[in-house]
Amino acid sequence: MDKPILYYGISGRLSRKMDQYIQISGGEPLLMIEKPEVVEEYRDRKLFDRYEVVTVDEALSRYPEPVIWVTFSKAINTARMLGKRVDPLDVHFFEADLEYRPGCSFLGHFISYRASNFSPCCIVSKYPSVKAEGTVEERLDQWKSFETKLLDDIRNDRPNGCMNCPHLVYDFWHKTVKLDTVNFGSCQPGDVCNYKCVYCFAEKFLNDPAKDKEGLTTYEVIEQLSQMPEYNTAELKLNISNGEFTANKDCDEVMDILLRMPWKASFLTNGSIYREKFAEFLKTGRALKVQISLDAGTRETYHKVKGLDTFDKVIDNIKRYELKNVEGFVLKYIFLEGLNDNEADVDGFVDTAAEVGCRKMTISSNLFKPFTPEMRTLVRRMIKRAADAGIRLQRNMNYVTKEDAAFMIDIAKEFDNLG
């Protein structure tokens, strides 16, 4: 027996598209579903003098196992709400590019760009890199073909590179492959860093002259990307976290492109170099995130961790950049046993964050090394003091064990301090 057909959403396009929708859904809707405040407007009348408008509760009380078609083009919240009330496979969309399947926050729209390859996510231990050749346009075509096949394999439960990945979960994800995020999280030719942080795993790549013999620089990738009309859109985001971008010889040229294009961008930096053009970009309001790795709260420890005595200079630069106006301004602290796992640095870090107007922080460990009991005591101290100063713990945590992440989330919730 066919399931009853219901529609969710009274949109502006409904009157001119109703006949088309009926053809797509295979029949007329028995009811229109809307929010209670909209339903109230139709208490004494029907939509188009034809369709009764009711709430989700009322609709499901009459038809417990329906097929629901959503008319909205932006429907992710509606989809997830409906997916909790009915079989998610019975939720369909006329305008939204959504489907219910296994997926993750990277799949189908994200590319982690490398000198001679790419990855469809940042979880490199879970998914291999893929060889790429040619221009940026040719490589993006290769990425699109690869991702399209990957999604098709996932939909049809065929063996694929994402199998058994713990980040793959059933939800409503985009149906079509469409790039909206380019990530530079691995070293490109020409990338440099002016620091020698004791915990850095990329130093050997940054200091390897052989890496400059192949592939495209970050500037070359971004410049070619800017020449492709389909990516001249405010929907495109760049994540720049390869080396220290302000020390790159092409930094100003990259900033010129970012100032010219409508893109948004996120940056990971040590904050040690002041660049006028970076400051100019921050004023555009298109900086989604600026994460600065402070990693210490005293000048002496900072020197030990970073290899340079530039703590005061970094603080001055942060103030000059007026990062208080950037919603995603985050200071990072990485716990290093025997170096910064002490009260003076923990307290100094929180005091410094408050001094420069930072309202978000992130805490990590050295390449997933579990926190020691002493570190857990200090983490609690840091989160409590941060809460008192109005500084929230960022929910997304990098390079910590699942147990330590859960531990920090519980503490942050205890102090109502989770960002």
Image: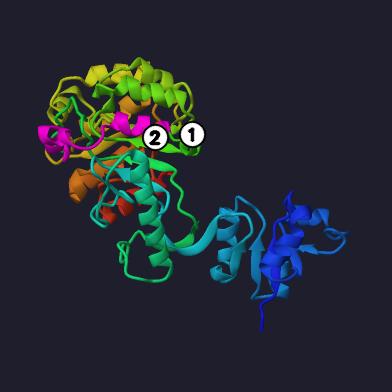
Q: Earlier in the sequence, mark 1 or mark 2?
A: 2
Q: Which mark is residue 21?
A: none
Residue type, label 2: Leu
Q: Which mark is residue 232?
A: 1
The local crowd at label 2, few if under 14, some if 14 to 19, many if 20 or more residues have their Cα within 10 Å, is: some
**Structural distance between the alpha carbons of marks 1 and 2:** 9 Å
Q: Secondary structure at mark 1?
A: loop
Q: Residue at x 70, y 75 (%)?
A: 4
Q: Is residue 372 above or below residue 359?
A: below
> Would residue 288 be visible to someone looking at this image?
no
Q: Which mark is residue 225?
A: 2
Q: Residue at x 27, y 21 (%)?
A: 314
> Would residue 111 be visible to someone looking at this image?
yes
Count of numbered badges drawn on the protein:
2
Residue 17 lies in quadrant: bottom right
Q: Is 363 colored magenta in this rendering?
A: no
Is 95 displayed left or right of 136 in the figure?
right
Residue 221, position as x, y percentages in the image: 32, 34
Residue 379, position as x, y percentages in the image: 27, 43
Q: Is residue 225 above or below residue 91?
A: above
Quadrant in the picture for the N terminus = bottom right
Is 285 displayed left or right of 340 in the figure?
right
Q: Which residues are magenta?
A: 200-227
Q: Secondary structure at mark 2?
A: helix
Q: Residue furthest bottom?
A: 1
Residue 253 lies in quadrant: top left
Q: Residue at x 31, y 25 (%)?
A: 352
Residue type, label 1: Asn
